[in-house]
Image (cartoon, helix red, strand yellow):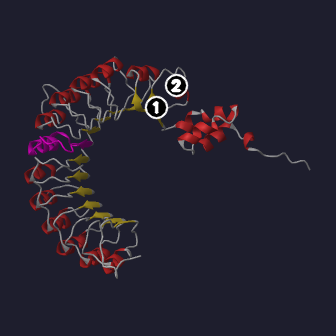
Amino acid sequence: MFEMETHISCLFPEILAIIFSYLDVKDKGRVAQVCAAWRDASYHKSVWRGVEAKLHLRRANPSLFPSLQTRGIKKVQILSLRRSLSYVIQGMPHIESLNLCGCFNLTDNGLGHAFVQDIPSLRVLNLSLCKQITDSSLGRIAQYLKNLEVLELGGCSNITNTGLLLIAWGLHRLKSLNLRSCRHVSDVGIGHLSGMTRSAAEGCLSLEKLTLQDCQKLTDLSLKHVSKGLNKLKVLNLSFCGGISDAGMIHLSHMTHLCSLNLRSCDNISDTGIMHLAMGSLQLSGLDVSFCDKIGDQSLAYIAQGLYQLKSLSLCSCHISDDGIDRMVRQMHELKTLNIGQCVRITDKGLELIADHLTQLTGIDLYGCTKITKRGLERITQLPCLKVLNLGLWQMTESERVR
């Protein structure tokens, strides 16, 4: 009986497209070069769904943007920008995500020439480390990118409160805003975002994620603004904000939607601040107070009383001891990640308490815990769900060292 040989070339284009969709970006490009049938299948939009094109814009390439549009690619990262940004915007009128992170030569003038009309499809714009960008560009963005949901401005050190006023005026759908190291931003700017100046701007009241890391001019007044106006906020990063204090935690303690709070290296946060957080109505799943020198064992007792639903807790370099661990572990049934690196007062006793009670832990950081030995480590490794164990500077005597 004659049997017809089955070959991959016999597959329907739709089946080939499904197979190609599982390949990484480079291999997607390679299969397009095999033959005409594979090229046609590989250009199916389902193959490239969600892919971000990474481009060096150095010289004119007439086929570049038609090729991207044929594949349905709507996300672009510019790795180097030697042509006008308007070249990108004109070539991809339905662009959804534009990543310009690190394009140091991008200026207000260049961005102004690109954004000259509404771009309703654009949802994500990353201008991190575009250090020449100023408030002028934010005016253009607020005017023409009304549907923007994510705006990354980390390291844009020329942004001021005026720029935040423009954002608060125009970007009402914004859900995520990164202002890391925007050191000219002060309480006034956060007030604009929070809708405290309604006569001038409605505010970005839909914000769910706000990164204010290293914004040195912020004080507790900013936290008051945030707590009053940004009721939908889920993630707040205040790391390295030296101007906030325990009193500011009172404002945050009643933000019922807040899930993650980062207070790393906030030097004025102490046990009292943690008490305020624990006594409120927070439902935090993540808290980071690493390198807060005034955090001690009393904070762990407060956490056990009022923040026992935490899934992730970072206490690196805090002044905690085995006694604090003892006061906390029995209530923290949902904790999955515990970072206590460089907590040099933690000994094997603390590790034994962790092993006995924090049975859901999947990751623990013990970097620089110099008083632990093989005995405590053996107990930790018996945790049933443990997947990540960071030892780093862990030190033992030669006879105790695990080989």
Whether tag 1 and tag 2 are in contact, CB under 8 A, the answer is yes
Q: Amino acid at mark 2?
A: Leu
Q: Secondary structure at mark 2?
A: helix
Q: Nearer the viewer, residue 255 or 300?
A: 300
The residue identified by callout 2 is: 64
Residue 292 in percent (x, y) is at 16, 58
Q: Which residues are magenta?
A: 209-231
The residue most toward the right is: 1
Few, some or many residues within 10 Å of mark 1 (<14, 14–19, 20+) = few
98 w.r.t. 351: above or below: above
Name the residue at 15% across, 50% down.
252
Residue 266 in percent (x, y) is at 15, 52
- Image quarter of the C terminus: bottom left
Residue 236 visible at all: yes
Q: Earlier in the sequence, mark 1 or mark 2?
A: 1
Q: Amino acid at mark 1?
A: Leu
Question: Where residue 55 is drawn, which disc sits there?
Answer: 1
- Please identify the quarter of the rendering in which residue 198 is found: top left
The residue most toward the front is: 398
- 228 left or right, relative to 111: left
Residue 67 in percent (x, y) is at 55, 26
Name the residue at 59% across, 33% down.
44
- 276 left or right, relative to 206: left
Q: Nearer the viewer, residue 65 or 17?
A: 65
Magenta stretch: residue 216 in it?
Answer: yes
